[in-house]
Amino acid sequence: MNNIFPILHTKRLDLIEIEQKHLPDLFILFSDKKVTEFYNLETFTSEDEAKILLNYFIERNSKQLSLRWGIAQKGTSDLIGTIGFNNYQKNHKANIGYDLQSEYWNQEFISEALPEVIKYGFEKLEINRVEAEIMPGNPASERVLVKNGFKIEGLLRDWMLWNNNHYDMLMYSLLKKDFLIKKN
């Protein structure tokens, strides 16, 4: 990956670099309890909390430890969500995550963005395996993954440690070879 942030486009979305100007958008996104219900962070109550996350995304992107896009509707720069690889290892694997303001749920935005991000990972980052871990009880996220070719691998017992509690996670994966077969 080079130092130029890759902008991706779909029919209705622009996947753009997350910048300081997006602080209010991230606060709106993560101050919604519906969005954070299955997320490993507390619902934001101040923009200071959003600034920490914003700086985390920017720093990890700049160090090429992750690649997180802001999701904007075509022709706008306001973020309605984020999507991307929380971390990745060239020629090996990446972990993917996504979130969306609840007012945009059930409009297929994540299902539209996910294939472009995965394609970028397989083709440009040379990833072989994309993993997605989701909390049990999140059927909307499970449907998105299955629709996009992910296979469930099983339950990871007490996999996630958050707020001094352990949580089970469901592991889904998509292999490059399976993606290429589906694409053709």
Image (cartoon, helix red, strand yellow):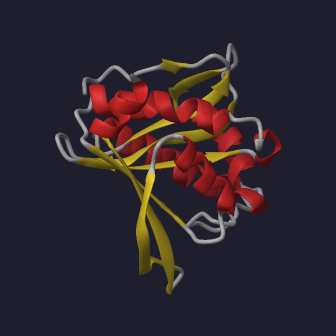
Quarter of the rendering occupied by the C terminus = top left
Instruction: Provide residue 153's location: percent of width, then percent of height.
Output: 39, 64
Q: Position of residue 21 (x, y in %)?
A: 62, 31
Taking the view exactly as shown, the residue that stands out farthest to the right is 103
* Left or right of residue 103: residue 165: left
The image shows residue 166 at horizontal and vertical percentages of 48, 84
Q: Quadrant of residue 82?
A: top right
Residue 13's x, y, as percent?
63, 22
Residue extending farthest left: 91
Query: For the N terminus, which image quadrant?
Result: top left
Q: Residue at x 62, y 38 (%)?
A: 110
Q: Looking at the image, which is closer to me, 120 or 184?
A: 184
Report if residue 120 is visible in the image.
yes
Does residue 123 appear to the left or right of 68 in the view shown? left
Q: Residue furthest top?
A: 75
The answer to whether 20 is drawn above or below residue 52 in the figure is above
> Is 24 drawn above or below residue 182 in the view shown?
below
Q: Is residue 99 above or below residue 112?
A: below
Q: Residue at x 74, y 45 (%)?
A: 101
Q: Residue at x 76, y 35 (%)?
A: 107
